[in-house]
Amino acid sequence: MSDTFPIIVWIRRDLRLTDHPALTAALESGRPILPVFILDELVETYGAAPKWRFGLGVGHYAERLEALGSRLILRRGKAAEVLRTLAEETGSDTVYWTRAYDPDAIARDKSVKAALTDAGLTAESHAGHVLFEPWTVETKQGGYYKVYTPYWRSVKDRDVPAPETAPSSLPAPESWPESERLDDWGMGNAMNRGAEIVAEYLTLGEEAAQTRLGVFMRDRIADYDTDRDYPATPGTSGLSENLAWGEISIRSCWHAGIRALHEGKPGAETWLKELVWRDFAYHLAYHTPRLVSGNWREDWDSFPWNEDGTTHEVTRWKQGRTGIRFVDAAMRELYVTGRMHNRARMIVASYLTKNLMSHWKIGLDWFADTLVDWDPAANALGWQWASGSGPDATPYFRVFNPETQLEKFDKHGRYVTRHIAELSQRPPETATQFYDAIPRSWGLSTSDSYPSTPIVSAKDGRDRALHAYENRDF
């Protein structure tokens, strides 16, 4: 094949130029590069907020490529068919992409690789989405890790390659194939009126992600170990949004954390552990694909959870009107910002699965529709951890008390006031925006009073959960 024919770089959840091994490998070939994004059969299944946020990221990435004299070709359809067609149109014989590890992505990628190989093309996947490839981390007995702490101990001293620098230019093909228009795809249609509200809280693109990392390293990581638990305090990195769409690499984050550790900043190790927790989620999703779709502990299949996501209790949970302030503030934060503080995620998950005795998959699906930082592996591990059905779970019989948690982590009510309008005579915009973002069909307004009693109190919910655990069949 002539060196004038391009290498196709299939852009997925890796919307960056810095530390992009597939892109680097294509550059090292000396051949022209044809970046392509495909609205494929997997991306089409994404929930409202993730699909919308992904589309915004794609648009921003296209602008960055144009600044380098390149383009992002947009096509819609089944990935294998689109890539074969592009190869025929351009004369390309090679396709590179960044490897994925969740079961749905693996299934798609295996199908694509087989189809491209059958067509006589070279198809290569490259590392870049996790710190450690799942098959390279094994127990002393040779199996995969099922518990986080031993996993952390086994990888914490491993060498992680330094992040690669961004290219200053990309060699363009002699001619560009036709591209579809991003606006024609309507990737944000399902967001409806909520898009205008949530857009105010996004941090979009690689440059903004790098700035966010720098601010965190300079101002916040030293106190991360304590501040990360207080939802009204800006104590976290906020990078989950950018990591989810690959606008910053996990290796860039790791090396920044290592530098902070060497500088003696006390919160650095805790943050590094959180990065490895993300890796652990993909480690488990790769080795046990059921993590993302069914009870990881299969003996939980007989547990009598409510599986109806339309019940009155579940609906009130989704609407942030349970009468439990910590839960309601968190659920409203989610609808306004597209994100939720990690401590709050644990509280709302515990309340749904234990106080309301509803299946974790209801929460998993709700988050998959509403989070702009949605990550298939992390979302699944988080829900299964909270419910007790997963690996490395909190003891299944432990039920978070949302009232004592609120007293401990939001003692002065700043988080609750920020997000629940009915509790203030002059509520802040962060609270009133909830009513501008939610579906009109909910029939809620700022004139509503806050629930006088919880749908299920902390005590009653705990008693109900413990009774179910005591009478379980496993």
Image (cartoon, rainbow, N blue to C red):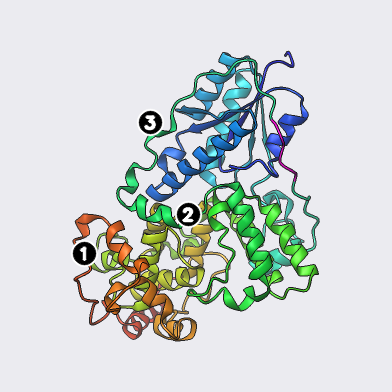
The image shows residue 385 at horizontal and vertical percentages of 51, 67
Image vertical order of residue 391 relative to residue 422, above or below: above
Image-based side of 171 in relation to 402, left or right: right
- Quadrant position of residue 41: top left
Image-based side of 236 in relation to 140, left or right: left
Q: Separation of disc 1 and disc 3 at Cα? A: 32 Å
Q: Nearer the viewer, residue 26 or 276?
A: 26
The image shows residue 15 at horizontal and vertical percentages of 58, 42
Badge 2: residue crowd in 10 Å (few <14, some 14–19, many ≥20): some
Image vertical order of residue 263 relative to residue 60, above or below: below
Which mark, residue 377? none
- Quadrant position of residue 321: bottom left
Image vertical order of residue 177 relative to residue 424, above or below: above
Label 3 sits on residue: 184
The residue lying at 61 percent from left, 48 percent from top is: 207
- Magenta range is 164-169
Label 2 sits on residue: 202
Which mark, residue 444? 1
Helix, strand or loop status at disc 3: helix
The residue lying at 55 percent from left, 35 percent from top is: 62
The residue lying at 70 percent from left, 49 percent from top is: 133
Helix, strand or loop status at disc 2: loop
State the count of labels: 3
Image-based side of 150 in relation to 10, left or right: right
Q: Which quadrant holds the N terminus?
A: top right
**Residue type at the position of mark 3:** Asp
Q: Is residue 449 visible?
A: yes
Question: Which marked residue is nearer to the observer: mark 1 or mark 2?
Answer: 2
The residue lying at 24 percent from left, 64 percent from top is: 311
Badge 1: residue crowd in 10 Å (few <14, some 14–19, many ≥20): some
**Residue type at the position of mark 2:** Leu
**Residue type at the position of mark 1:** Leu
